Image (cartoon, grey):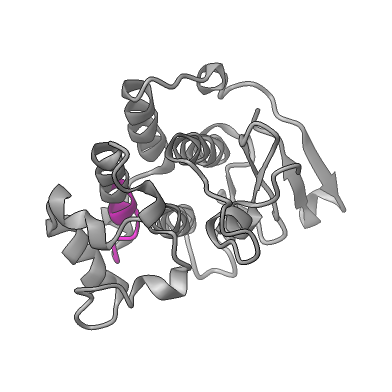
Amino acid sequence: MSNGSLHDWLHVVEDKGKILEWHLRVTITVGIARGLAWLHHWCGFKIVHLDISSKCILLDKNFKPKISNFGRAKSSSFAINGEFGDVELVKKDVYSFGIMLLELIIGKKPRQITNLPNCLDGTLVQWNNHISKTSLCGMNDVIDKSLLGKGYEGEIFQFLTIACSCVQPRTDQRPTMLEVWEKVRAIRERYGLTDKDDYQLLRQPQIGTSGTKEDLEIIEVETH
C-alpha cells in the first residue's frame, strides 16, 4: 500500500518529521472498527482475525485502512480445539483493537504502555484503571506529544475511554466491535468527518481463499 502500515507511521525512526495528524488517526480508527464489525457481525463466516496489530493495518493513498494478515483467522462459529467459544474469540479481537487504539493515541509500542507514569504495579489493568479515573487535564503525560495543543483533547479523551473499555480483563466487560464502531463513528461525525462506506457494511466484499472449505485461509478482505 502506498502509505505502508500504521506501525510505520506511529513508530518512525528515520523520518522524524513524519507525523500522523489526528483527523487521519480518527479516520483510521473508524475504518478498522468498521472492518472488524463487518467480520464479526455481518460476514457469513463470522470471521475473527486473532492477530490485529498496527503492523497488519495497511494504509492506502488516502490513509483509509485495510486489514491484512489473515493467516490466523478463524470462523467464530466453532470453538477452536475445544478451548474457546465464540465470545472468547470475538472478544480477543476486541482486546487487540483496544491495545492498537492505545498505541495510536499514545504513540508508544504495546510493550511500552505499562511503563507509563502512574502504572503502579506494571500491569495493563492498573494502567487502565488509572486512565479511567484521570481527568481530561491529566492527559498531557500520556497522549502522543505531536497531538497536544491542537484542540483535539476532547476527542482524544473519548477515544482513550473506548480503548480502555476494550482491554478490560474480563471478556464480558468488553464491548462488541459493533458497539465500538458505533461509538467512534459518532465521535467522528461530531468532529465533522463523514464516510459513505459507513452505510455500506452489508456490501459483499472480495474475499480471496486458498485450499478446501475445511482448510480455509483468508487471504484478504476488502471492506471499502
Q: Which residues are magenta?
A: 162-169
* Picture layout, residue 14 above or below residue 178: below
Name the residue at 75% across, 42% down. Answer: 2
Asked if residue 132 can be seen in this view, the reply is: yes
Q: Is residue 77 left or right of residue 92?
A: right
* Picture layout, residue 68 above or below residue 39: below
Name the residue at 46% across, 19% down. Answer: 194
Residue 39: % across, % down: 57, 40
* Picture layout, residue 211 above or below residue 208: below
Q: What's the magenta bit mostly, secondary-structure-wise?
A: helix
Q: Nearer the viewer, residue 8 or 96?
A: 8
| Residue occupying the far front of the picture | 17
Quadrant in which the N terminus appears? top right
| Residue occupying the far bottom of the picture | 121
Q: Nearer the viewer, residue 216 or 15?
A: 15
> Is residue 31 one of those drawn in magenta?
no
Residue 115: % across, % down: 33, 78
